[in-house]
Image (cartoon, coloured by chain):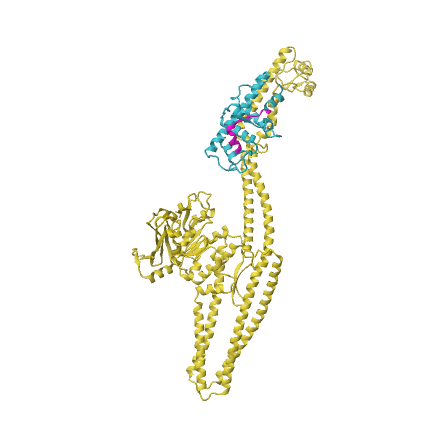
Amino acid sequence: MTAQEFKSNITTKRPRYADSRIPLLEAFSEKGSRNADYSRFGPIYELYIYAMMLGIKRKTRLPLPPRNLTSDFLELGKWKRDSSLVDFLLMIIFTQTEDLSFDWNELEDMEEEQLNKVVSEVITLIEEYANGGLEYLETLWQKGELDTSHYMFIDLYKNLN
Amino acid sequence: MASIINSISFKNFFNYYGDYDDTRYEFEEGVNIIVADNGAGKSKFFNAFLWLFYDQVLDSDDKQKKNVKDFAVKIISDKAKQETSIGDQVETGIKIEYSTGRYKYQIIKSFTATRISEKITDFDSWQVTINDIEIDKTDHILPKYKPVYDAEEKDTIVKQLILPTLRQYSFFQGEEVDKMIDFSKKSSIEEAVRTLTNISKYEEISKLVKEIAEKAEKDLNKQTKATSEHNDRLDKAIEEKEALELKLEQESEKLGEFKKLYEDAEQEKNNLEQNFANAEKRKDLDDKISDKSRILRGVKDDYDNFLDGINKRFFDGNFSWISLGFENSIEEFKTKIKEFRQVRYEKQALLNASENPNDFFTFLPVNSPDAVSLDSMIEKEHCFVCNREAKEGSEPYNHFIKLKERPKNKNPKSFVKNDLEDFFGNLQINATPFYNKFDTIQTSVLRTREREIELKERLDKLNSELKSLKSQRKDILIAGTDSEHIDNATTIINNYKGAIRRMEQAFTRIERLEDSIKSIKADIKNTEKEITNLRPKDIPEGYTINYEISKDLVEASYNAKERVFDKMVSLLESHANKHFQNLIKYNDIKGGVLKFEKTPSGGISLDYIDELGNEVSGASEGFQRMKKFAVVMAIISANTSHYNYPLLADAPLSAFGKAFNKGFFEAIPDVFPQSIILVKDLYDKDVPEKLTDLGLKLLKSDFIKTFHINEVDEELAQIERTTNIERRK
């Protein structure tokens, strides 16, 4: 498998989220109704990325429910087109070594089947960190601890450093 | 000594539910503020004084004043009504304490209502008995209240709180300021002057001495006729004088008529002028409003887009907020990729070595050194890698040759199954914009906030400018002429011209009549001299002296009256300007002074003129009211060194801007020893303190002596609602 094939194997995947997160996703991204009380993101993937990074910052991975209780959305490679955002995210993801069962050099010697498993492992990592981040947002939201400022997301993000 | 209201308390009075002790305001000398939102008891408070002074209250439904007796059922607190069982009684009342220098009074006005049937809001369900007014009095030395029984004394005590003639200046609701003084009527300032000065005494004296003089003249003439020395020449002179006096009277009457004509025409002209100018002004304002709205929409869009875009900055490579806090991950990536590459090279080198044991062996990366460097190394017989000499024929030199001749394998045998070097390498190269912003993110978040504040300020400024334009336009509509039609405009112009023509005609006649009156007066004076010369010498001296003195007195008293009036007007002018400048201290109004002018008809007009003497027009309703309030303050301050009554004003600020509100609170202590101001403009329900910025500032100001906030729980049904009074100061 070439570098390009490996990358496209990752970027053609559609990460999933638990159906129970739909209200949250609608409330905090443009998919929802127009008159929201809170600051919001544009497309779902923005909130999803944000949640994933929160998850990584807070080191909270949360497994998803069985597949039929989840939904997918945009392919990873189409998140923020014409930008290297996804490359940056992959950089962060591939440094989460305590979560990943392989060593970079090992990858180069794997059989295709094994490599596909690695790709799944990476996608699961993305999904589980995103789920962890969404859970955190959801809890704050339910407790009424999210403020209504336009800077709510960046403030929250900053304070987790 | 001034009357100072010490406290007011209510018992089941409208929303002021509970006994007197539960709903009590305490006040001090100086400025007292009560802040309340709509429906939180401002007008009810005001109603207490309407009850005290006039046995009336204002029905907020139709803005009519109703007698307490007829309106009683509505006055009782709904909650109190509900709590009264059929057959039981409920008492409703107001209690006011006030002091003068020597005494302190407590006044209670109340009524008792007995519930007789089910429906509590029905007037028929209650039997109302108005209780006698109770007044107690104490002096400050022995503070023990004793009841006052004498009805006349009770009446005086109530009146003394604010004298009835002064109540219009001291006790009013916002819009009443407009009616206090109507500057388009000549009599308005005269009346104000009359209310507060002793000018009518001068008029009485003037009238009295005129009567005396007439009588003295009659007596003198009678004496003259009685003497033998009397002659025809004298008779003729006296007749002549009588004829002249008759003529003077007729001409004066005519002058009065023409002055009236002039005044009417002037009034019409002023009204039309306003209409005429309004049409122009409105058009002008409409254009401005439309421009401003367009700009506002643009800025609003910018602002909305900006807000929507804030979170985009997480994912935009120019800001890269998403990378915040991931510095370590990036460092780790760099370390890992270095290790990854090292392992690869080792792997590759080992593979090469094992496959071609006789071939060269190097740990240097593939194709390194490159061909150009190798050539140079061979030529200079020097190794650039280890910086050592490598003479031709030596081992290192032969190694160069070996390297130069190394197999040029375009597709080197792959030493791994999956070559992922480019995968990791490209991630690192491509993602550069996202991980080279770590140092600038904090600043960029800060700049974003600053930019937002900038936009917000711009938006607020535009909004307030637009609001002010709209309010100016509304003022024009209030002035009563939204004339949309051209024919209307033509009529206005014709009428306007007609009014000016009539003014000019009247003015010519007034001038002519004034000249004529002047010459008749001169004739009368000369005739009088002639009469004196012709008078027989044997008339008892007393008659002549009596006549002469009374004549002088007539003139003197007339002059005195005129002088007092003129002096009062100029005093009013200077006081009004002083107050006006204080009131507009924080406003953005350029210069200008108030000017009192005598009109040809003898009235006084009030103009606001700029430093070049041009009249300033087009000011908002708030500004007009401010002008009037300055005159009201002047009427009070110009007439008395110390005004002895409190100011009780409900919503005096409703039409003013913030800046004026501030000026108002600072200026009123100049005139009123105590003022109690009910105001909603300082209320802000959206902040925890419930006060606007100005409200908070005033709360801290020394000159504000007490500060109350009324709150009503709006979530309760009307029937449950009660006003809670919170004293903040």
Quarter holding residue B370: top right
Q: How many marks?
A: 0
Q: Position of residue B274 (x, y in %)?
A: 57, 59
Question: For this rendering, which residue is in front, B132 or B515?
Answer: B132
Indicate yes or no whether the magenta region holds residue B522: no
Q: Position of residue B472 (x, y in %)?
A: 55, 53
Q: Quick check: A104 above or below A84?
A: above
Residue farthest along the bottom direction in this orientation: B228
On the question of residue A57 being in view, the answer is no
Q: Position of residue B707 (x, y in %)?
A: 41, 49
Question: For this rendering, which residue is in front, B50 or B675?
Answer: B50
Q: Quick check: A135 above or below B12?
A: above
Q: Quick check: B518 above or below A57?
A: below
Magenta residues span A11-26
Which residue corresponds to the image point at 60% horizontal and 63% vertical from the top-left? Answer: B495
Instruction: Identify the image quadrant of the N terminus of chain B.
Output: bottom left
Q: Which chain is yellow?
A: B
On the question of residue B168 being in view, the answer is yes
Q: Is residue B173 left or right of residue B413?
A: left
Q: Is residue B611 left or right of residue B25?
A: right
- Chain A: its colour in the image is cyan
Q: Position of residue B476 (x, y in %)?
A: 55, 55
Q: Quick check: B729 above or below B399?
A: below
Q: Is residue B399 left or right of residue A138?
A: right
